[in-house]
Amino acid sequence: MTTGVDLLQQVRGVQADSWSSLLGPGVSESVESVVRPAVVATLLTERDASDVDLLRAVTAYETASRAEAGDGCGDVLLACCWMLFCDGHLDDVPLIWQAKKANFDAYCYIDGVFLMPHGLDASLALATQTGHGDLLAYLQQAGLGDSADEIEAWRTSTFFAACPAPTSPIDDLAAWLRG
């Protein structure tokens, strides 16, 4: 029985350039339905600062899968974006934006506040500096406001609080997150 901790240790033990063969879109149905969701569920409770590149890669893989499917978002992609938002790296805003744009469901499901880890002004400046015109237009028109209370509410949210223990079997972790 492989647990979430076992799986995360396995993924951490390989070079980053090999992650796509383990977790990427189109690898296998079990990667889509079990492995990637189990990694994300485990990261919800076992993530540390050294996992930021893994989280970014998994977010990109899940975004590509959702874009290819043309629908659906679900808690796997939402959890990835939420963790990136909580980490607070402004450089992750374009990645979260790509996830939000993956399809109509993702656009609706991923909260716009995830694009503002340091407030609206910081994200507007980033979008301007990096030439992300569509992100800039969204931020200007979405009426998101610069609500520190809303940002804090998401950062302290209990949305994923019922996550099974990382020592749970990967099938259980994936089933919970794919729920």
Image: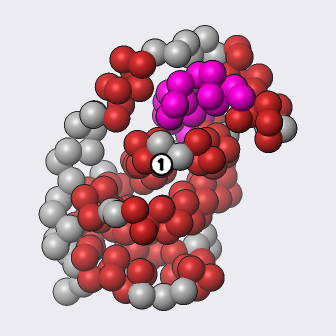
Residue drawn at point x = 26 percent, y = 45 percent: 160
Residue drawn at point x = 15 percent, y = 63 percent: 165
Magenta segment's dominant SS is helix
99 and 65: which is toward the camera: 99
Residue drawn at point x = 40 percent, y = 74 percent: 35
Which image quarter holds the N terminus?
bottom left
Circle 1 SS class: helix
Q: Is residue 20 magenta?
A: no
| Figure check: 25 above or below 27 | above
Q: Is residue 112 magenta?
A: yes
Looking at numbered disc 1 in the image, what kind of residue is underneath it?
Leu
Check disc 1: other Cα within 10 Å, few if <14, some if 14-19, many if 20+: many
Where, by quadrant of the figure, is residue 172 drawn?
Answer: bottom left
Residue 33 at least partly seen: no
Locate residue 179 relative to residue 85 in the image: left or right.
left
Which residue is label 1 attached to? 84
Q: Position of residue 9 (x, y in %)?
A: 33, 82
Q: Position of residue 122 (x, y in %)?
A: 62, 28
Q: Position of residue 19 (x, y in %)?
A: 55, 79
Q: Which residues are magenta?
A: 105-125
